Amino acid sequence: MKIMNAIVSRGWALILITALAIIGYVFEWPIGVLSAVLGIILLMGLITAVVGAREKELEQASQRLRQLAGYFCRRFMGDSSLSIFAIIDSLFKTDNAKLWDWARACDMSQRVFNTWNASFTSRLEVDTRTGRFTIYVRSYLNELWLMSCLYYEFVQQFHEIAQKIALPAETLEQYHKFVVEYNSFVEQFRDSIGELKQIAGTEIEPPSVKAAQEVLTVPKKAEKEAVKDPRKGMIT
């Protein structure tokens, strides 16, 4: 039954053309009229096949985006140990009061992100169950892109601090793990953006999603200058 349904839904044009050709031959229909009718049916079949293929590509691309969105929310948000906010919280282990102030400010931002993440995840699950995700794929793409861009600002700020001030080894190790996994997500997200741009004509450019940077070893002299020279805008 499934095979017959597939033939009827995908190969209806060929079936109809064959049937009409046989009937036309038996009843000796005019060649010109028969050719015109068969040509129109063939054209309609080709258009249907192209549209069906494009819808299939969009469905597959939407599924990959949905998986990436779920992965981002699950792995880098909320209470995950790989959340940049969890790494920032580890700065309270240092004896730098200004770092504490910055970490407290980030804690307020984390609450906003967690609320946003909860809403995003809830809508994602509902639209996945109801099969409406593909319909709203542009909206989800734009929202995930915006979320990742704002999220990256905290990643960048932490990286700038880590380049100038000596941080605990545990914090740097946790950040290194974060960079490896986050950059893997970035590469996949860029691929998904490029795919949807080609299929659905979305406007976001893949390079707009930034990768996290590794923390390089800071020379002791540069570290000393970073701590003592507040005119350069460095946290001390």
Image (spheres, helix red, strand yellow):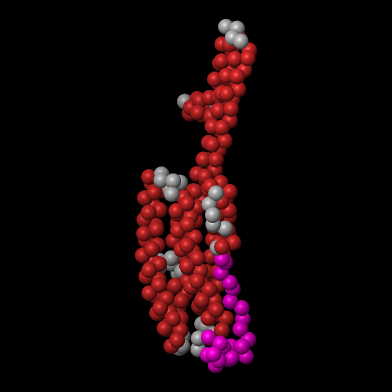
Q: Tell me if 142 is positioned left or right of 184 in this view.
A: left
Residue 13 image point, x, y percent: 55, 24
Viewer can see residue 67:
no
Residue 147 image point, x, y percent: 46, 63
Q: Is residue 84 above or below residue 47?
A: below
Q: Is residue 182 above or below residue 67?
A: below
Tally of marks: 0
Residue at 39% across, 49% down: 127
Residue 228 image point, x, y percent: 55, 93
Residue at 58% across, 72% down: 213
Q: Is residue 208 above or below residue 233?
A: above
Which residues fall within the magenta stretch?
210-234
Residue at 57% across, 58% down: 205
Residue at 62% across, 90% down: 221
Query: Along the line of sight, which residue is nearer the eye, 149 or 131?
Result: 149
Viewer can see residue 103:
yes
